[in-house]
Amino acid sequence: MTAAVEVEAPKVIDGLPAEDYHADRTSISSSGLRALLPPGCPAQFKYDREHPAAPKKEFDLGHAVHTEVLGVGEPITVLDYSTYLGRNAKEARNEARANGQVPLLRHEYEQVQAMADAVRQHPQAGPLFAGQGIAERSMYWTDPATGVRCRVRPDWLKQLPGLTLSVDLKTTKDASPHAVQKAIRDYAYHQQDALYTDGIWACMQPEDVRFVFVFVSKTPPHLITVRELKDQEREIGRARNDRALRIYADCTASGEWPDWTGPVTEIPQIGLPSWDVIRQTEEYMQ
């Protein structure tokens, strides 16, 4: 007889600093699973995990809106400069980042406040974030099929009678439903939906779970789209997660993190996207 493999129990942590959550190397997050699949690959995922990128200005606005709406997150430092062209402005920005703060120019902070106000005043988004809720709860569990430790960190958890509601706040250039559909495809947000839903089930064992996206536009009047994913798309996201988990488990076990092609003996062929093959065939080969 062989001893059963001990599986680490689910774990819930409130108040875990974001930098500790993102620095964890014993588990994989939704963004990690998405990075393992095309257009990403295991080799790029491994490099990016071992060489974290420096904070990017384009993400400051989103972080700040989260802080304003959720009431938790990296503190905001407002800099009384119109641009970062001057030396003093650059030094103030760098000092803020070194202290773990989000630097914003005065006009950027006013933009963040306007976006947060738009969320609070929206007839659907406002009530989702109103009242009692849990911001950025970190949850860990073990995928039963692969033994991989997973983690999620929902923006906002709202407990309702018989229901746990997970609300995900995203800032975007275009919050129209058409643009939201493209964003779900381009950033594989259906994988995020599936993993977060599964994580909440595993760690909190609620009666029911729903996952809701709130997209808010960065440009005035800061229009908002609130949507739930269709069941079929969530299942596709779950299937993508299953494949990414198997890839991660295999790479971890073998120590090999291949690129898009992997080991081959012949140079593979490549062609146009299938939709363009059809279009150009109809246009030029009739």
Image (cartoon, rainbow, N blue to C red):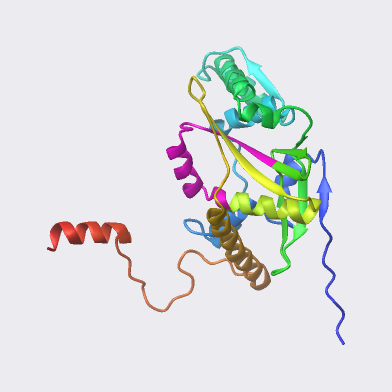
Whether residue 232 sits left or right of residue 168 in the image: it is left
Whether residue 267 sits left or right of residue 98 in the image: it is left
- Residue 240 lies in magenta, yes or no? no
- Residue 170 lies in magenta, yes or no? yes
Quarter of the picture holding the N terminus:
bottom right
* Res 94 quadrant in image: top right
Give whichever of 174, 209 is nearer the camera.
Answer: 209
Q: In this picture, is 229 found above or below 17?
A: below
Does residue 50 appear in this view? Answer: no
Give whichever of 95, 206 is nearer the camera.
Answer: 206
Percent across and percent down for residue 184 are 51, 46
Quarter of the picture holding the C terminus:
bottom left
Percent across and percent down for residue 107 are 55, 15
Please count the marks in the image.
Answer: 0
Residue in the image at 46% along x and 37% along y: 177
Does residue 1 appear in this view? Answer: yes
Whether residue 206 sits left or right of residue 172 in the image: it is right
Percent across and percent down for residue 241 are 60, 60
* Res 179 quadrant in image: top left
Q: In this picture, is 174 found above or below 144?
A: above
User: For the view shown, which residue lies furthest in the bottom direction?
Assistant: 1
User: For the view shown, which residue lies furthest in the left direction?
Assistant: 286
Q: In this picture, is 264 found above or below 76?
A: below
- Which portion, as a residue range, is magenta? 166-190
Percent across and percent down for residue 31 are 61, 50
